Image (tube, rainbow, N blue to C red):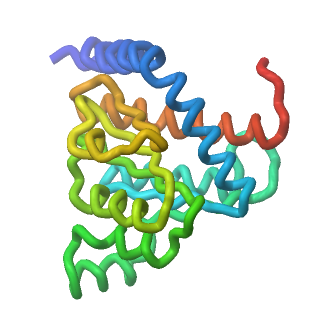
Amino acid sequence: MDLIHRISRQFEDSARIKLEALEALAAPIAGAVEIMIGSLLNNGKILACGNGGSAADAQHFAAELVNRFEMERPPLAAIALTTDTSTLTSIANDYDFTQVFSKQVRALGHPGDVLLAISTSGNSPNVIEAIAAAREREMRVIALTGNDGGQIGALLDDGDVHLCVPAQRTARIQEVHLLTLHCLCDGIDCLLLGVEDQ
């Protein structure tokens, strides 16, 4: 096996998918930034959830907001619902794993908050339940999915934002999700700090 060739193909494939996603996602990402800024400026917060690599993405995003991304600014309110092992395991043990995020949304979410729901397939049952809980709490939903958006794509309302990566491979979807999260962070910082386009 020619590993160098295989690695080169991975890079080329990732770059191609990102460029293809740009056309589909640029406007919805901008819309998601506006929703998040609106919430944060009105004392709202962003709750983020996902499974596996998407859980890591949720934590990454929350860390960038609470700490900082690339510019100095005050901390912003964001919570990853994937980090508290006592809460996660107690809910999974006493109820069901499908409720590990939804119970937290019901406990922590308020009208005007935003749920960042991440699922590469768009079919993660516990993320779907979190979206239902966000509806109950009068929260907006920003969903990161892939392929055809799965069940999550069909659940979203007009006031929500669907960031669906036009790819089938999980790795490629995750790579675009990470870039999308960085675009969200950058957009939030630029709008908050009044940064002009460079």
Residue at image x 35%, y 28%? Answer: 165
- Is residue 59 in view from this perspective? no
* Residue 109 vertical position relative to residue 50 in the rendered view, above or below: below
* Residue 18 vertical position relative to residue 179 in the rendered view, above or below: above
* Number of disc labels: 0
Choose top left, top right, bottom left or bottom right for residue 5.
top left
Residue at image x 71%, y 63%? Answer: 43
Residue at image x 25%, y 19%? Answer: 3
Q: Is residue 97 left or right of residue 186?
A: left
Q: Could you say where residue 6 lies in the image, as x and y percent from the top left?
A: 25, 17
Quarter occupied by the C terminus: top right
Q: Could you say where residue 67 lies in the image, as x and y percent from the top left?
A: 69, 57
- Is residue 133 in view from this perspective? yes
* Residue 120 vertical position relative to residue 77 in the rendered view, above or below: above
The one of 135 and 141 positioned closer to us in this rendering? 135
Q: Is residue 189 left or right of residue 49?
A: right
Q: Could you say where residue 147 lies in the image, as x and y percent from the top left?
A: 24, 29
* Residue 176 vertical position relative to residue 54 in the rendered view, above or below: above
Choose top left, top right, bottom left or bottom right for residue 45.
bottom right
Quarter occupied by the N terminus: top left
